Amino acid sequence: MLKLRKSSLAQWSGAGSGFQGGTSFGRSQSPHGGEILSSGALGYFNVWQLVEIQWLPSWRIDAKQKCLGRFVFSPSFPRMNWPAECVVVIPCLNESATIAYLVETVRTCLPRILVVDDGSTDDTAHIASRSGATVVKHPQSEGKGAALQTGWKWAREQKFQWALTMDGDAQHSPADIPFFLKRAEQSAADLVIGNRMLNPRGMPWIRRTVNRWMSARISRLAGCELPDSQSGFRLIRLAALSNLPATIQHFEIESEVLLSFARARRRIEFVPIQVIYKSEQSKIHPVFDTVRWLKWLIRVKRIR
């Protein structure tokens, strides 16, 4: 029961789908040249005709969209009530310098924020609470994976449908949040991940290289291309997550969740995000966390 009609043009924003309205498609100039049609369900295509798809009580199709030499029809999905259905989960360890800015800025888009303080020794918890976030505090540091699991459990108990995870060091830009929400609406994805690898020039060389190496191996195990497996900027459907294993306590959590979704054939989408690296020191230990990740990789290969 689809009816297609012509839609007004929308302007390319340079990240994600970048169009206004949950059911609209638009023609624009791609950053890589040429015209594109943006849709989470279809990917990017050269288009000859613009359409907006609406559900109507009729099997008759009144217009067609010609795409790559074929007629393609893509349903839209209901717009979500994101402020009510989505909570932002921010795992933190000694992020007093950045957490106030992050919480206050994110709240302009999504008002419900949970900061999981993973045993910080500074004022992270107090500053986050004062800035408007709900705070859950671990008595001692248990690891990023443990902090995320605490956040997801809390979110499910509070009846949220979605969780958006961001790092507490302000490496993830709140300005990118709308692109996650729009992609989830357009594609019905269970997991939307921020992709830094389309324009990784701002990333330190070692992080860029390790990310590509890890992503290639996880892609091989998953049987599909996963361009940024280590990004912590993610929108997750909690109902899908609750049916999948998530037991890791440390930084391997991103890899474990991504591979679990892929193996369960859950829909995964990527949206381009900004790359923000300043002078902050990474909390990933170059030896211990690398060894943990390699042990995790060996284990999941055995149970493939």
Image: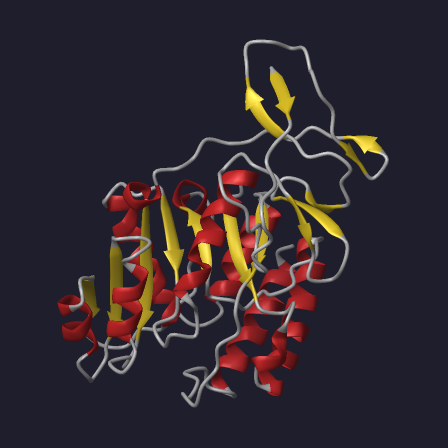
Q: Quadrant of the C terminus?
A: bottom right
80 lies above or below 195: above
Whole-percent x, y for residue 272 in the image: 58, 61
Q: Which residue is drawn at 62% across and 19% down?
A: 3
45 lies above or below 94: above
Whole-percent x, y for residue 181 in the image: 45, 48
> Is residue 36 toward the left or the right of residue 206 in the image?
right
Q: Which residue is drawn at 13% across and 69% down?
A: 130
Q: Which residue is drawn at 57% across and 43% down?
A: 266
Q: In which quarter of the image is the N terminus?
A: top right
293 lies above or below 7: below
Count numbered badges in the picture. 0
Which residue sits furthest front?
A: 8
Q: Is residue 253 visible?
A: yes
Whole-percent x, y for residue 119 in the image: 23, 77
57 lies above or below 150: above
Q: Can residue 188 be seen in this view?
A: no
> Is residue 75 toward the left or the right of residue 69 in the image?
left
Whole-percent x, y for residue 75 in the image: 60, 29
